[in-house]
Amino acid sequence: MKKVKAKKQYGQNFLKDTTVLDKIIQSMPNNNNYVVEIGPGLGDLTKNLVKYKDMTAYEVDTDLIGILESKFAIEIEEGKLKLIHTDVLEAWDKQKTLHDGKYDLIANLPYYIATNIILKAFEDSYCENIIVMVQKEVAEKFTAHVNDKEYSSLGIITELISVNSKILFDVPPESFDPVPKVTSSILYIKKDMSKNLDKDFNKFLKACFVQPRKKLSKNLTSVIDKNTISKIYEELNINDNVRPHEVSSSLYSQMHTRVKDGRN
Ligand SMILES: C[S@@+](CC[C@H](N)C(=O)[O-])C[C@H]1O[C@@H](n2cnc3c(N)ncnc32)[C@H](O)[C@@H]1O
């Protein structure tokens, strides 16, 4: 078969390392959940996933859809694989979920929208487990805890929405074709299905971290007035000198509730 030219604008780095592919499959949670893959590409991961689970794959690239349709003609015919030709973020905007029933998201994500995709998966009430390949630095942000250098809104949201989050293993650039400039990691997040996040919380956290080295109270002045900040700090026993990365996720959540109450 003619070699497919990877398209940069779609973040195409095809995973060629069979050991890594095997390790991803071994990391799949042992449950009855359906599987959703974003960006099946040339179908190397898809081929392994569909052996174990019925699944849907969302692919934006028209050229790849043609290849996948002929490669997986049998699985599609048997109803084991549903192939959807669309931009996955548009699909999420339209239908709020990628599958009408509990599912696990397993994917080698396009780097340019990886963070947005994970945040969408947090909002999707049917998505339970997230096992995705992302740039190592992104994985570190999602798994960072209070006082860590990488701690930011992503680590805080992950802590509040999940029961478990960790980096499973790193993947070197040579495992891909074309070879990316960065190291990747497999990120695992098990969501707490009883929780959902307030829509404005992410916006609030962004304001809290707008100048990460400054005092949190200074950053908060873009959201609330100084008197309310003093009142909230007193109620929650927060030191005025505290910096954004020194505050726990649960304290951020309590602060946000009070900010909202103050506005109502
Ligand atoms: C990093 S490649 C992974 C390909 C394949 N899964 C693999 O592991 O080799 C990312 C894939 O996501 C697809 N993609 C990029 N943007 C997308 C979008 N907005 N919606 C759906 N798929 C997208 C690309 O075309 C590509 O197939």
Image (cartoon, rainbow, N blue to C red):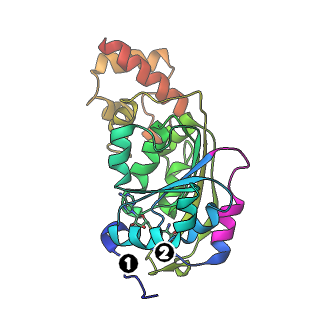
Q: Quadrant of ligand 1?
A: bottom left
Mark 2, other Cα within 10 Å: few <14 / some 14–19 / many ≥20: many
Mark number, residue 14: 2
Camera-side residue of 109 and 241: 109
Residue segment shown in magenta = 21-33
Which residue lies at the image location 34% right of the left edge and 55% below the top edge?
A: 87
Instruction: Indicate yes or no whether the magenta region holds residue 209.
Output: no
Amino acid type, callout 1 = Ala
Which residue lies at the image location 36% right of the left edge and 30% below the top edge?
A: 217
Compute the Cα span from label 2 to label 1: 8 Å
Instruction: Indicate yes or no whether the magenta region holds residue 23.
Output: yes
Mark number, residue 256: none
Total numbered badges shown on the rendered structure: 2
- The answer to whether mark 2 and mark 1 are in CB contact below 8 A is yes
**Quadrant in which the C terminus is drawn:** top left
Q: Is residue 115 visible?
A: yes
Q: Which residue lies most toward the top here?
A: 264
Q: Is residue 72 above or below residue 178?
A: above
Q: Is residue 120 left or right of residue 251?
A: left
Which residue lies at the image location 38% right of the left edge and 52% below the top edge?
A: 88
Q: Residue beneath label 1, please? A: 6
Does dot 2 land on a helix, a strand or a loop? strand
Q: Quadrant of residue 222?
A: top left
Q: Is mark 2 within 8 Å of ligand 1?
A: yes
